[in-house]
Image (spheres, helix red, strand yellow):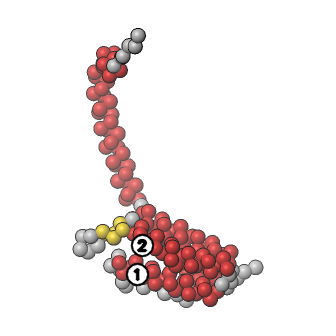
Amino acid sequence: MLVTIRLDVLICATIPMTLFADAATNSADEIIALKAEIAALKATTPSQSHAMMDVDYHFSNLWFAAQNENWPLAAFYLNETRSHLNWTVRLHPVRKLADGGDLDLAPILKSVEQGGLAQLKTAVERKDKKAFGVAYRETLSQCYACHQAAEKPYLRPHVPTGPATQIVDMQPK
């Protein structure tokens, strides 16, 4: 013989109703607290321009590491560039445009990763300084296309004239 027990009826019959009211109040308080915590976290999140300064630092140093044929260092700065570009898009995946529209940065990043950054990776792995220069300039063009799409055409990246860091020796061993 099968016996069916309705747990909702059983619970209601054995738990005082005041506990349900307390649970609802606690849940509402928790939701308020969580919303406040989310707002506080959003307020401490770096701006996209802050994250892009890290990209600038790593991408500039990448140029000088490759120019000095310090390929392990170039690989390091390339990986840091990729990592910080991804961080930038995670921080603010969508930019608001002047017309009220949205610019989804994820597809743009994917294009840069599959285009210029992939070419740079190949050039670094092959230790090909000439191919690196071509790929670096192509990546700069892709970066500028993103800046234009984001309504920031005045942010025109170019091949750096000096390394972003003075403390790291760009020369290979």
- Can residue 57 be seen from the camera position used here? no
| Image coordinates for residue 72, horizontal then vertical, percent | 68, 75
Disc 1: which residue: 145
Name the foreground residue: 89 vs 170: 89
- Can residue 71 be seen from the camera position used here? yes
Residue 33 image-quadrant placement: top left
Residue 23 image-quadrant placement: top left
Name the foreground residue: 123 vs 95: 123
Near mark 2 (Cα within 10 A), the count class, few <14, some 14-19 or many ≥20, is some
| Image coordinates for residue 100, horizontal then vertical, percent | 24, 70
Q: Residue at x 56, y 87 (%)?
A: 134
Instruction: Check disc 1 and give the amino acid type.
Output: Ala
Vertical position of residue 32 compared to residue 114: above or below: above
| Image coordinates for residue 9, horizontal then vertical, percent | 30, 19
Disc 2: which residue: 108
For the N terminus, which image quadrant? top left
Instruction: Check disc 2 and give the amino acid type.
Output: Ile
Q: Residue at x 42, y 85 (%)?
A: 156
| Image coordinates for residue 152, horizontal then vertical, percent | 35, 80
